[in-house]
Image (cartoon, rainbow, N blue to C red):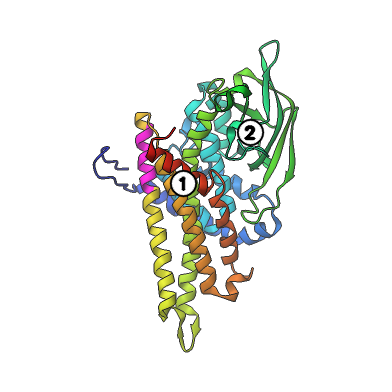
Amino acid sequence: MAIGGQTGPLSLALTEEHEMLRTAAREFAQREIAPVAAAYDESGAFPLETARKMGEMGLMGIEMPEAYGGTGMDTLAHVLTMIEIAKADASHSTILSVNNSLYCNGILWFGTEAQKREWIKPVASGEQIGAYSLTEPMSGSDAGNMASRAVLNEAGSHYIINGRKSWVTSAPFADRIVLFTMTAAEEKHRGITCFLIDTSQPGFSRGKTEPKLGIRASATSEIIFDDYACPVEHVLGGVGQGFKIAMTVLDAGRIGIAAQALGIAEAAYEAALMYAREREAFGAPIGTYQMIQQKIADMKTRIEAGRGLIYQAIIAKERALATGGRYTTEASIAKLFCSEAAAYVTDEALQIHGGMGYSKELPIERYYRDARITRIYEGTSEIQRMVIARNELGIR
C-alpha cells in the first residue's frame, strides 16, 4: 500500500498478495456461496457451514495478526474480500464484516494481551462466531439512552448485567459478544462500559430471530441478560470507555459496509449489463437504446465514485492507525455514498430487467432488498450526514 503525506497525493497500490486474496475470495464466493445464496435467502437459515469455510480460508480475521488466529493483512485486503463475498451474497458478507470489523477490531485495539489471545483467536479463525451489541429497543442512534445496566458486586469480582439488547447481528449463533452497557447511567455517554461476553454462561439468553426484508441469512435477534455475572477481567478498555470504543470500531465497520454496498451494486450492475446486451426489443438489444445507456453510464459512475471514496477512507484509516488520529469523516462519507449508490444501482438494474427483475427467478430482487439495510445499520444515512457536517463545522 502506498500512502502519500498528509497534504500530498493519496494512492493505493494492490500488491501481489492483495491480488491473490481477491482472486481466492472471488473463486470461493462464486463456487461455494453463489449457488446456495437464493436458498438461504428463502429459508432464512444461518449459513454456518460456509461461514466456517470462510474462517478456514482466513477471511474471518483478515486484519488480525497471525498470533491471534488472523491473516495479518490490512484494510484494503478486508475491503477487497468484502466486495467479492457481497457480490455473491450480502448475508455472508454481513457475517464476515461483523467478525472482522465490529468484533475483532475493538479487542485488538483496546484489549489486554490476555484478552486478545483468549477472545480474538477463536473468532478470527472461524471456529466461533462473534457479535457486537450496542443498540437497544429505545436507544438506536442515541447510545446515551441505554436502559441496560452493569453493577459491580460487593466482592468487586464481577459485574452483574441486566437488560435487553436489540438488532444484534449474528446473535442467534454468536459464541462471543462485544457488549456495551451502562455502569454509570447519570454520566450518559461517559457512563458506558464495554464487556466481553461468553454466551455459554448462565444469565444469557436470546430473543426471537428477526424476520427481515433483506440479508435474511444473516441471523439477527435480541439478547437478554438476567443477572449475568461478567468477571472484571472481561471489561474491555477500562470502565467508562465504552462509547469511545464503540465509535472507534464503528469507523472501521463503516468502511466494511461501504465495501458491502459496493459489492451488491457491482453484482446488480454486471447482471444489468449482460441483460442489456442480450435482451432484444423492437429488433435490437435494449442496450442500443439511449435511455438504457444513460442508466448504465449513471450506474457505472456511481460505482467507481464509491470505490474511490472507499480507497480514500482506507488511506485515512491506515494513516490514523499510524498516528493515533481519527478517520471518522472519511469513513462516514464512504458509507453514506456507497449505501445510497447501491440503492440507486439495484433499483436501476431491476428496472432494466423489467418483469424478470421483479421475479425471484433472478437474483436482482434480492440485491434490491439486501441493499436497503446498508443505509440503516452501523449508522443511518441521517447519522452519517450529521457526523460529516458536525466534523466539518467543528461541532462537538
Residue type at mark 2: give it.
Arg
Which of the 4 image quarters holds residue 359? bottom right
Q: Rounded to the nearest whole Å, what is the CA distance between mark 1 and mark 2? A: 32 Å
Q: Nearer the viewer, residue 189 or 226?
A: 189
Query: Which residue ends up furthest to the bottom in the rendered image?
Result: 283
User: Can residue 215 be seen from the camera position used here?
Assistant: yes
What is the x, y in percent for residue 137? Answer: 68, 39
- Tell whether position 127 is magenta: no
- Count of numbered tags: 2
Residue at which label 1 appears: 385
Label annotation for residue 46: none
- Residue in view at x 51 percent, y 22 percent: 112
Residue at which label 2 appears: 176
Q: Nearer the viewer, residue 265 or 72?
A: 265
What is the x, y in percent for residue 23? Answer: 43, 54
Question: The magenta stretch spans which residues?
Answer: 311-321
User: Can residue 74 be seen from the camera position used here?
Assistant: no
Residue type at mark 1: give it.
Arg
- Residue in view at x 64 percent, y 29 percent: 197
Q: Nearer the viewer, residue 138 or 240?
A: 138
Answer whether labels 1 and 2 touch (C-beta < 8 Å). no
